[in-house]
Image: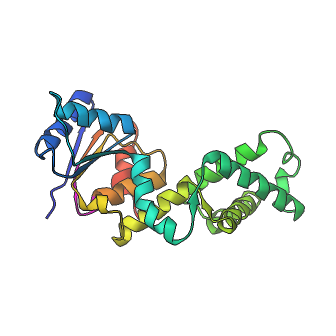
Amino acid sequence: MIARALITSHAAHVRLESARGWLSGHAPAAEVVVVGANAAAAAELVRTSLGDGRAAFGWHHLSFAQLAAALASPALVAASLVPVSRLAATAVVAHAVQGVGRAGRLGRYARVADTPGFARAIARAVEELRLARVDVATLEPHDPDLAALVAAYESGMADAQLTDWPGVLAAARASVATGDAHPLLDLPLLLLDLQPHSESEAALISFTYRSRNVQTRIGKISRHTAWHRCTAATP
């Protein structure tokens, strides 16, 4: 059975020393994966853990976004989906607004749909809803006008065979849940100071932590409930 540990502390040096201690138990040629909040943090941990000019040939270091992309890649390729930037997603939202407007379904948005910044504002709302895993069926009884825009956006993305950051997270989470994930998850894995900003990110961290080879997760204690969200996240 793979041992799991959750180490938390207000002090950064305590968390980093715990992470370095974990890494010191692995030979530089052994394959392990270090995932940080960003790529620089993960790389810095690996560098300082080695010291004295030593090199590690098997220590992979990734950001959380890179891990999510790697985990999602097989599912996205199988579905012929291409991840796009937030700017490209905003363009799809603008096209969706035009389509919903032509259908006369903008509702309360009809008066402001042509104003500068409207597409960007709706794009942010759509992304937040998708990151919170709120689907159109759930949203429609509460806000049919916004639900129509979300539905048009998702239809447009599907027609163009594109996906956004929430879609990447969903694909990664599904891969981990079904056991059809990236070979990196077959390696000992360290998660360092990952701070989810949404329900989708928390769920992926939770699924990854519960996968068979995750040995240590190290995070900071704060007034926020990020780590509690990771622990409590469900499929």
Q: Is 170 left or right of 183, judged from the image as shown?
A: right
Q: Residue 177, located in which quarter of the rendered image?
A: bottom left
Q: Quadrant of the C terminus?
A: bottom left
Q: Position of residue 111 (x, y in %)?
A: 89, 47
Residue, x 16% and y 51% (percent of image)?
Answer: 30
Residue, x 70% and y 60% (percent of image)?
Answer: 153
Position of 231 relative to 197 (above/below): below
| Magenta residue check for 70 | no
The one nearer the camera, 55 or 195, is 55
The one nearer the camera, 79 or 111, is 79
Please say which color scheme the image uses.
Answer: rainbow
Q: Is 79 left or right of 60, judged from the image as shown?
A: right
Position of 145 relative to 217 (above/below): below
Q: Position of residue 7 (x, y in %)?
A: 21, 42
Residue, x 30% and y 62% (percent of image)?
Answer: 183
The one nearer the camera, 45 or 138, is 45
Q: Position of residue 157 (x, y in %)?
A: 66, 62
Give the magenta range.
210-216
Is residue 99 in view from this perspective? yes
Q: Quadrant of the N terminus?
A: bottom left
Is residue 221 in view from this perspective? no
Residue, x 12% and y 46% (percent of image)?
Answer: 27
Q: Residue 121, located in which quarter of the rendered image?
A: top right
Q: Report the number of numbered marks.
A: 0
Position of 74 relative to 84 (above/below): below
Q: Position of residue 106 (x, y in %)?
A: 83, 57
Q: Residue 20, located in which quarter of the rendered image?
A: top left
The one nearer the camera, 89 or 6, is 89
